[in-house]
Image: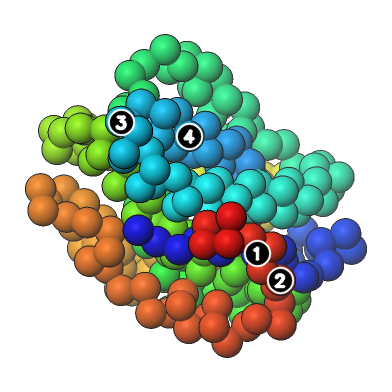
Amino acid sequence: MTDLVVRKLLVDLNTPFAARWNGNDAFRSAFFNALSMSFPVGEQFFMDSVRAGLKTLPEEKRAEFAAEVQGFVGQEATHRRVHALFNGHLERMGFSNTIAKRATARIKKQAGMDPRVHVAATAATEHFTALFADWVLRHPEALEGAQERLQTMWLWHASEESEHRSTAFDIYQAMGGGHAWRLRVFRYVSVVFIVDVLRQTVRNLWHDGALFHPSTWRSGAKLLMAKDGMFRGNVGMWRDYLREDFHPDQHDASRSQAWLRDNTRHFVPVGSPAAA
């Protein structure tokens, strides 16, 4: 089991920031904004799915996972609140959050499905966020030029995503979820996640007035499709999820552990399963 500490982030998210907050780079700002716009609805779904999955387990298994799920829910609830504050500034600048509307409609449509499908979707999305999180920790240039408070927000979130990357996966396995369905849901989530984020990025760029600037797409190609870009550079680890013997703990988490160890001035622990 993983001991997941819930942390209160000590950064100012009340002060407004510029639309191109990420180093005055239109694409990097629009892309990270699209990710943030997806988080509150997504994280609520993750919390609901994992809690519902836990309730289906036999009593002994519920006891085994209860503390970890408590920590997972606490971390995700904190992420949801922080990104809601961040997204509020985007809304006041006129950015339209269509990714959240599409996700909400999809969740409602699929509400009656087997709880294992919801937990599998959570595990699949957590795999994506863990890959992207580790990539951001490996590539500080992705946030170069951003204010320190915003860099801290993203690196804190990235580190916690890596920290709890196994929780939904383990719950799915404990529920008796099979490999075939895990892959089916993963492929579906892969397409939906990437398409939704890119659609929202394009919408953000349109609002910013940068959609048709060549420099915008040069930056996008560098960020996503360079040899070690966020998309191209993660293909191998994305494929790892397809293996029947895969487990998220097989991927290195040392960068997130190091960031959390070395940046305690930026947060205060407010709870952990061990203390609960």
Task: Determine the CA span between mark 3 and mark 4.
Answer: 14 Å
Q: Can you say whether 66 is above or below 133 in the image? A: above
Q: Secondary structure at mark 2?
A: strand
Query: Residue reaching furthest left?
Result: 244
Q: Is residue 273 left or right of residue 191?
A: right
Q: Nearer the viewer, residue 66 or 244?
A: 66
Mark closest to the chain's N terminus, 3 or 2:
3
Q: Nearer the viewer, mark 1 or mark 3?
A: 3
Q: Residues within 10 Å of mark 4 (few under 14, many from 20)?
A: many
Q: Is residue 68 visible?
A: yes
Task: Determine the CA span between mark 2 and mark 1.
Answer: 5 Å
Q: Which mark is residue 185?
A: none
Q: Which residue is mark 2?
A: 268
Measured as percent of width and height from the top left, residue 157 is found at 58, 63
Q: Residues within 10 Å of mark 3 (few under 14, many from 20)?
A: few
Q: Which residue is mark 4?
A: 51
Amino acid type indicated by mark 4 = Arg
Q: Which residue is mark 1?
A: 7
Residue found 55% across the figure and 77% down from its top? 260
Q: Secondary structure at mark 4?
A: helix
Image marks 2 and 1: residues in contact by CB distance under 8 Å: yes
Q: Nearer the viewer, residue 70 or 137?
A: 70
Amino acid type indicated by mark 2 = Val
Q: Which residue is mark 3?
A: 58
Q: Can you say whether 149 is above or below 235 in the image? A: below
Image marks 1 and 4: residues in contact by CB distance under 8 Å: no
Measured as percent of width and height from the top left, residue 44 is found at 58, 36
